[in-house]
Structures are given as C-alpha cells and as structure tokens.
C-alpha cells in the first residue's frame, strides 16, 4: 500500500456548513503521496461539489466506507467516535474538539484508541501561525459580525451628502481587539462608520489607532496590562475593572453599533454589557455578541435570534464562520494542511509531530488522555 490514507467526513453538527478539506488541499495532500477519501456531499454547504473533489483526485465515498483504513481523519468539529469505525488503530483525528467542555467525547476517543489532535490548542508561536484555526476563523467572524449588524441596523453606516440633506455616519464600538476585533474595526471603517474600540490589554492601543479607530482606555489606573499567556487576555484587577466599566458605560450610551468579541479559553465568556447599559443606548441600535455560543458577552443575548430590549437589537450566531462557509473552509483546510505537511517526511511517507506542537495539540494517545491542560 502507498502513503497515508486521509479521510474527510461530512460535518454532522447542526448548522455546520464548513468542510475540513477543499479540492486545493486534497491535491496538495495527494502531492505529498497520500490517498484521500471524502464523504459524499461533504462540501455541499461550502459550495464544493463531489465532482470537484473527484477531479482533485479524491475517492468520493458513502459514509460507511469513507473512514475505512484511514490513518488520519480531518474534521472541522470533531466527529463522534461512532462515525470513525473502520479507521486504523491509533488513527489521528485533527479537528476542533472544544476540549474544556467536551471531556466525555475526549474520553471516548481515548477508549477507542484514537489520537485526538485539537486544533484549538495550537500554540501561539510564529511558526504555527499558518496552522492556527482560531485566528483564521475569527478573522472571518469579525468581518461577518459587522455585516450582519449593518444589515440589522435601520440606518446607513457612512455619512452621505444628498440633495435631500445629510445622513450622519454611524458610530461603531468594538469591544475586544483580538483577531476578530481587528477585522471588525477594519470592516466597520470600510463601511464608513466612525469606529472606536477597547480591550483589557493596553498594548492594543496602537493597533486600534493604526486601523484609524479611536482607542477607549482608562488612563487613570496605571500598571495593569491584562496580557495573559500566549497573547490571550486575562482577568483584571477590581480597581481597573471599575474604572474601565464606568468609561465604557458612558461610551456605549452614544453608540449605534457595538460588536463584542471577548473570549477566555476554557471559561465562559466574560460579561461586558449589562441590561442597564443596553437601556442607555438609543432605540434602533444594534449589538452583535460574537461570544454568544460561549455564554455571551451581552446580558440577554440568545444564539441565532435577534432579541429586542429597550429598543436595541441584540444578536449573535452560534457559529459565525459557518455563515461564510466557502472562505472559512478554504482557510481551515489550509490550516490543517500547513499543520500536517510541516511534519511530513516524503521519503518514509510518515508524519512525526515534534514535541512543542505535538504535545500542545495531542489530547489522547495509547488509550489515555495525555494533554497537560486537561489533567
């Protein structure tokens, strides 16, 4: 038998339109010497036909045959163990696992002798940037959040000078300046809004300014950086939280659009906007809560629903990247290819992960949960 056998299943999670391989990455994997199997209809949500996969060299097979003999299974969201029957013993599954909240699934992977590789645990180091699915998907999510909010908003974003008078520009405020927040700032600016932004990490001030937006930061409380390990935000001191909350409250009252993007890995999303703050906003304003699926940054937000409170529309999607399925799939599948190809030995046809990245992403091996972060 030739090189490694890679399989891609159709995503089973509700509302998941993405797919873990595209014809582009199928061709690249085959170029490394792999053989590739894709489940029928796997790409339909991302506008990729079975014929496109076949033309790229993949075997397009039914659900019961696609995983048979697979060395590696790729997924967007980790498949159930039941869907992996027939894979080789010790097969790798590279996907997102939501490791802190899906412990039962991870234990089931261990019991089944599968090696779970969690793409969310990719270390935030320079050489792994091209493998980072959280960043690639957050980028698109930040863009989509602004478009969805603009669509919901009953007024225009840019200032318009017309014969019938002037339409004033919308004021947009982005809370949390990670990858999603930076893209939200850029998108709101492109649409013509007056944009401001804030973050718990004071180092983001220059990033906000570089995109032409106004930073909203407490100046009076010094020495609180808010930078956690690996570039993620951490919890703040009480004094800073109080001062920042007062400043942000006064600012929110004047905004037309607010986009919240704050997530702390493995924890519920921090509460950024309370019902009392929503009540200060003018009717017709829109809040998009990008963290709604992790408990929400906004009091009263409900995934995939527009909730109107005090005349303000509060919205958020349970899976924002899935609303841009074709691009989200293209980027996600490249992240997977960049990850595996970095460790691919063309001579032997084997993939050997190094310690730094391998130990970071590996959840299960040899029948046990092995990841330090889960112990």
Image: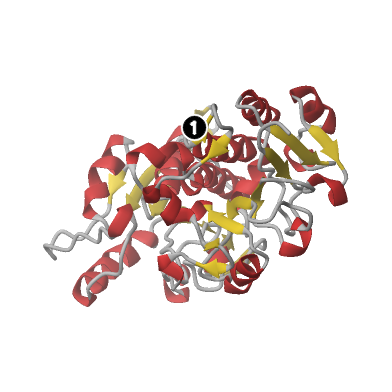
217 vs 32: above or below:
below
Judge left or right: residue 207 versus residue 258: left
- Residue 351, position in %: x, y? 53, 40
Judge left or right: residue 285 versus residue 67: left
- Residue 348, position in %: x, y? 56, 32
Judge left or right: residue 360 versus residue 351: left
| Residue 44 location, quadrant | top right
Residue underneath mark 1: 160
Report the number of numbered marks: 1
Along the line of sight, the residue nearer the viewer: 41 or 34: 34
Along the line of sight, the residue nearer the viewer: 333 or 178: 333
Can residue 265 be seen here? The reply is yes
- Residue 120, position in %: x, y? 49, 54
Along the line of sight, the residue nearer the viewer: 296 or 227: 227
Q: Residue at x 57, y 72 (%)?
A: 103
- Residue 183, position in %: x, y? 44, 41
- The quadrant of the image that shows the C terminus is bottom left
252 vs 147: above or below:
below
Can residue 193 be seen here? The reply is no
Identify the colour scheme used: secondary structure
Callout 1: few (<14), some (14-19), or many (20+) C-alpha neighbours within 10 Å? few
| Circle 1: element type | strand
Q: Residue at x 54, y 61 (%)?
A: 365
- The quadrant of the image that shows the N terminus is top right
């Amino acid at each position: 038998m030739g090189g490694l056998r890679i399989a891609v299943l159709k995503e089973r999670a509700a509302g998941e339109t993405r797919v873990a391989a595209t014809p582009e990455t199928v061709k690249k994997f085959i170029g490394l010497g792999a053989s590739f199997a894709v489940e029928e209809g796997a790409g339909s949500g991302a506008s990729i036909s079975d014929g496109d996969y076949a033309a790229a060299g993949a075997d397009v097979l039914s659900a019961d045959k696609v995983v048979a003999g697979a060395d590696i299974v790729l997924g967007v969201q980790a498949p159930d163990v039941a869907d992996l029957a027939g894979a080789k013993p010790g097969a790798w599954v590279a996907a997102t696992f939501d490791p802190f909240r899906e412990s039962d699934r991870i234990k089931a992977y261990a019991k089944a002798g599968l090696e779970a590789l969690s793409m969310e645990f990719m270390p935030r180091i320079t050489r792994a940037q091209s493998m980072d699915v959280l960043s690639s998907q957050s980028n698109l999510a930040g863009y989509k959040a602004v478009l969805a909010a603009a669509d919901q908003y009953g007024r225009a974003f840019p200032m318009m000078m017309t014969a019938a008078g002037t339409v004033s520009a919308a004021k947009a405020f982005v809370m949390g300046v990670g990858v999603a927040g930076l893209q939200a700032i850029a998108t709101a600016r492109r649409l013509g809004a007056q944009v401001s932004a804030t973050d718990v990490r004071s180092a983001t001030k220059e990033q906000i300014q570089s995109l032409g937006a106004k930073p909203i930061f407490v100046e009076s409380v010094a020495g609180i950086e808010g930078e956690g390990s690996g570039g993620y935000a951490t919890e703040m001191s009480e004094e800073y939280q109080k001062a920042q909350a007062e400043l942000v409250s006064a600012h929110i009252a004047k905004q037309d659009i607010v986009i919240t993007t704050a997530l702390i890995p493995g924890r519920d999303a921090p509460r950024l906007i309370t019902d009392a703050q929503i009540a200060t906003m003018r009717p017709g304003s829109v809040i998009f809560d990008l963290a709604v699926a992790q408990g929400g940054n906004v009091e009263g937000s409900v995934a995939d629903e527009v909730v109107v409170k005090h005349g303000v529309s509060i919205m958020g999607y349970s899976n924002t990247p899935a609303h841009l399925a074709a691009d989200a799939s293209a980027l996600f599948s490249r992240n997977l290819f960049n990850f595996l190809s970095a460790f691919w030995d063309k001579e032997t046809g084997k993939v050997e992960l190094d310690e730094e990245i391998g130990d970071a992403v590996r959840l299960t091996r040899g029948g046990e949960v092995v990841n330090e972060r889960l112990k």
